[in-house]
Amino acid sequence: MSSVTYPENWKGVTIENISSFVGRGIGPNYSDIETDVIAINQKCIRNGKVNIDFGRYHDNASLVRQSAILNTNDICINSTGDGTIGRVGLWDKPNSTSSFFVDSHVTIVRPISEERDSKYLSELLSSEWIQNDIARYCFTGSTNQVELSRTELLQLTLYFPELKQQQKIAEILSTVDNLIDQTQSLIDKYTAVKLGMMADLSSRGIDISGTPETNKSYGQLRPSYEDAPELYQETELGFIPKDWHAEPLQEFLSLITYGFTNPMPETEDGPWMVTAANVIDGEIDYKNTRHTSLEAFNTLLTQKSKPKLNDILLTKDGTLGRLALVDDETVCINQSVALLRCNEKVKPHFMKLLLETEKYYHKMLDDAGGSTIKHIYITIVDKMLIGLPPNPKEQDAIYSKAAAIIEKINTEKTYLEKLKLKKKGLMQDLLTGKVKVS
């Protein structure tokens, strides 16, 4: 088991001895119409909770085994699949007229409430060291078909303080969870505002005709086509402002390519090797990006794998359509990432913002090829029709309008990361007894 040490008075017990039931759910019989029985699947288990928004309706005529129906304070653990297996969520919802049950890919741990606090137990099972134990001792099967073994899970030993301490620790962690939830709600709210704003800005633009003194609408969103049809032209994209251009993406680029396919050595530091997995939330996630040697960077790579500052990166394999601007000169990309270098017709920050809008994002996904695994092909995406203002002042004006809400989103994301780090530290201190509570 893990090398974590606990206070001597904390009792070590197996999951079998603290649970009234441990087992998986059943295979659902999905319904295309709304019913009062909902199947909880692995997508529902996230961030320590069970999100019913990802559940699916189950045919009322198909019976559900009683043990698979969720009770308040049940703990759900994802039990199959690389990447999500082991993820833990607490079912803290009161019983309702709707029946919620877990499918056969989720395990229920139903703790004996008189002895264990469910919130404490779910946090303990989510902790880094217990997750490592679960992965090491409770997973069975091959790399592509990993399963959570009920037999091994039952024998997993956990350490607990007395019940009152469990409840106090759970209360402290719940306080941080509430702040995390509130912050995430703000991010979701601002993101929805940004999507709506960009839908208008990318189709109507900003009026910059004349000057602020001669044009009372200067710097404002143009009237819609319905209100002022004389300001618009009809194109294959629909109606766009009269002075905008609608051309294939390649007309706004001086280069479109993708990165290296050859193996590259890994080093502790040096140039960054960016893959599709490292492009997240509109930027490069350097925390999880690997390095290669400067020698390999200079000798093994061609210029197409070494983007320049302000080049746009587009994920073409894996999770498709994510974008980032290059902000470091010592970056190289592999074949899962496309490089888009803007020409003089468009500013890179504006083009990235435009490609992130739902219209162009979904167009790229719709045009993706491949039977089982989808890919964005640069020979197809470069022909995607783009509508934009030729005037760089209008491009800047549009970006400035969006920048305010983007800054709010980024501020809240930074705060969210701080809260998550704070919770991680609290879990390490409180769930191991390093810091005592009274």
Image (cartoon, helix red, strand yellow):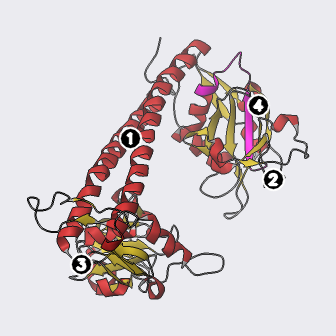
Front of the two marks 3 and 4? 3
Of residues 363 and 319, the one nearer the viewer is 363
Residue type at numbered disc 4: Glu
User: Could you say which disc has been placed on residue 390 in the image?
Assistant: 3
Measure the C-alpha gap from mark 1 to mark 3. Answer: 38 Å
Mark 3 or mark 4: which comes first in sequence?
4
Task: Write the start and end of the magenta stretch as one range.
Answer: 104-120
Q: Residues within 10 Å of mark 4 (few under 14, many from 20)?
A: many
Front of the two marks 2 and 4? 2
Q: Residues within 10 Å of mark 2 (few under 14, many from 20)?
A: some
Residue type at numbered disc 3: Pro
Q: Position of residue 42 (x, y in %)?
A: 67, 49
> Which residue is disc 4 drawn over?
16
User: Could you say which disc has been placed on residue 31 in the image?
Assistant: 2
> Which residue is disc 1 drawn over?
416
Report the side of 139 relative to 188 (left or right). Answer: right
Q: Position of residue 260 (x, y in %)?
A: 40, 82
Helix, strand or loop for disc 1: helix
